Image (cartoon, grey):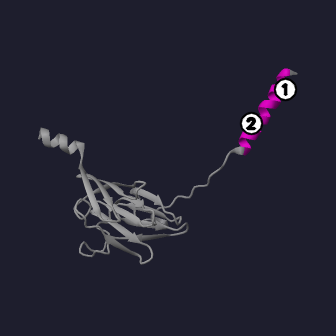
Amino acid sequence: AIMRRHHVILLLLLTCTLQAQTFYRFRHHGREQGLSNLNVNCALQDSRGLLWVGTNIGLNRFDGSRFHTYFATSSEDNHSMPSNSVTALAEDENGCLWVGTNNGLCTFDLQYDRFDGIEEKGLGHGNQIFSLKFDPKGRLWAITDKQLVRYSPSDKSLKTYEHPLALLMSKNG
């Protein structure tokens, strides 16, 4: 009788556990669905619910049903991405998308559907952006191939910190 009671309790626990599980359905998206490249470097879901995907060949915006892809048009055009290789993404408190590439940083204005280049020393052309993150004060922190950069968009002030590895290499090299 005790053994039967344990089996009933165990069966009830398993039934409750199975009912509490959440099942997720995944859909795979690739080039056939409009993704520009399968080499994904970064992804971000913004405050509007759009999914932004940075690849080696462009920036992709996914609205839940289809992709729209943005490509760099010209290195001379300040309203173009600095490069097609998108390496980092961040969104600021105002909903502005910041796009790091292997050749500098830009912002994307969804209302006007255009990019604006950031030309501050340490973030502009010639700087490979590896990572972007906003702190609680609204300052952007960027890790580049040369240094750590703290940028304040409100007053356009910039502070750079040399990579510890770069310091080590300069002392030993």
Which of the 4 image quadrants contains residue 153? bottom left
Instruction: Let me know if residue 43 is in the magenta part.
Output: no
Q: Position of residue 75 (x, y in %)?
A: 24, 72
Residue 10 lies in the magenta stretch: yes
Magenta segment boundaries in residue numbering? 2-19
Query: Alpha carbon of mark 1 to alpha carbon of mark 2: how far?
Result: 14 Å
Q: Magenta span: helix, strand or loop, mainly?
A: helix
- Image quadrant assignment for residue 88: bottom left
Residue 167 is labelled as: none
Q: Is residue 50 left or right of residue 115?
A: right
Secondary structure at badge 1 equals: helix
Name which of mark 1 and mark 2 comes first in the sequence.
Answer: 1
- 62 relative position to 80: left or right: right
Residue position for label 2: 14
Q: Which mark is residue 5?
A: 1
Residue 171 horizontal/vertical position (percent): 13, 40
The quarter of the picture where the C terminus appears is: top left
Amino acid, disc 2: Leu
Q: Quadrant of the N terminus?
A: top right
Give 90 or 18, whichever is nearer the viewer.
90
User: Which secondary structure, mark 2?
Assistant: helix
Percent position of residue 126, x then y: 22, 61
Given the image, on which type of amino acid does mark 1 rest?
Answer: Arg
Identify the residue shown where x is 78% and y is 34%. Answer: 11
